Image (tube, helix red, strand yellow):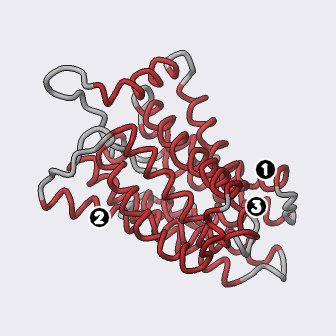
Amino acid sequence: MATMNADTAEGGPSPRFSLTALAGRGFGAVPPTALVMLGIVSVQVGSALAKHLFSAVGSFGTVALRLFFAAAVLVVVWRPSPRMRRRAWAVVVGYGVVLGLMNLCFYLALSRIPLGIAVTTEFLGPLVVALAGSRRWLDAFWALLAAGGVVLLMEGRGDLDLVGLLFALAAGTCWGLYILVGAALGRHTTEGDGLALGMAVAALVAVPFGVADSGTALIQPWVLLAGLGVALLSSVIPYSLDLEALRRIPPRVFGILMSLEPAMAALIGLVVLHESLHWSQWLAVLCVVAASAGATRGTRPDDTAS
């Protein structure tokens, strides 16, 4: 997950940061590793809740609700200024488009394959980014281990939906781009402005798909409430937790902790959605987790900052 710079605003404290400052003080008593783990659990519980919405509004409608409410909350919290240089706006738009496409592809995958498999496959995107350009033999081993995990995923069950797997790979590709564009977003914007505006662009990408696919089903009160819950659990809460954690631990340590996400997704899928995996698919999840943790652990500190 790309992170944004949290620099201090010039000219003294601003009222628009009072809510985030209050949250930061509350988070201060929680160890940063616990914050990361809470963020991971929040994301996966949000994905499980989103999957329950598919029967009512479909995957497109669910994405639309998630990004719309996430953008609304972040814009209210940060109150970003649209006055930016053209280069900064180009980065914000690129970030938002990639974020919107990543969510659309991931939810299309989630509607066809189990949560644990979808997240494990999607996680290959950031893994490729971590390994790109490396000349270390050990990183070649991590790449082979991840590739072995993919083979195990595909052979674990004969009824695994190939289209769903391809959508998960597309989401992983977008995740890799998201990391790269997110690093540029941190350089060209300050505090949470880039995240809030980028989320608004992502909502503009996804909402038309949701409206076209689901229509008035989107405005049912219980659907709106569930959509708000998905947005909070999948976007607002984990992004806030991650930003606070990254102020207190090195990005390399953060990356290693994030490597646990596929395993957590498989566990949440089992407990909340009753999605059981074949033993070989559990082994595949562990292969990707180990490859990601190993690749992140071997990255030089100056390569991990974003």
Residue 285: x and y in percent read 71, 59
Q: Where is residue 167? Give x, y as percent.
A: 59, 77
Q: In the rendered view, does 191 fall on the left or right side of 218?
A: left
Circle 3 SS class: helix
Q: Nearer the viewer, residue 199 or 239?
A: 199
Marks 3/1: CA–CA distance: 17 Å
Most foreground residue, 223 or 286: 223
Name the side, left or right, on which 6 lies relative to 19: left
Residue at image coords 62%, 71%: 216
Select label 1 or label 2 by which is in front: 2
Q: Residue at x 47, y 63 (%)?
A: 175
Q: Is tag 3's residue or tag 2's residue first in the polypeptide sequence? A: 3
Which residue is depicted at the point 28% across and 52% down? 185
Numbered badge on residue 146: none
Q: Nearer the viewer, residue 11 or 137?
A: 11
Q: Disc 3 designates what residue?
A: 52
Q: CA distance from mark 1 to mark 2?
A: 35 Å
Q: Which mark is residue 267?
A: 1
Q: Quadrant of residue 162?
A: bottom right
Marks 3 and 2 sit apart, C-alpha to C-alpha, by 30 Å
Where in the figure is residue 155, as x and y percent of width and height? 79, 78
Q: Nearer the viewer, residue 239 or 132?
A: 239
Q: Residue 219: tell me if it is visible.
A: yes
The residue at 82%/66% (across/down) is 280
Mark 2 is on which residue type?
A: Val
Counting residues from the N terminus, which is met first, the one under dot 1 or under dot 2? 2
Which is more foreground, mark 3 or mark 2?
3
Quarter of the image for residue 117 reads bottom right
Location of mark 2 (residue): 93
Task: Inspect the image, locate mark 3, and give the three-letter code of the amino acid beneath it.
Answer: His
Q: Tell which tag, 3 or 1, sits nearer the viewer.
A: 3
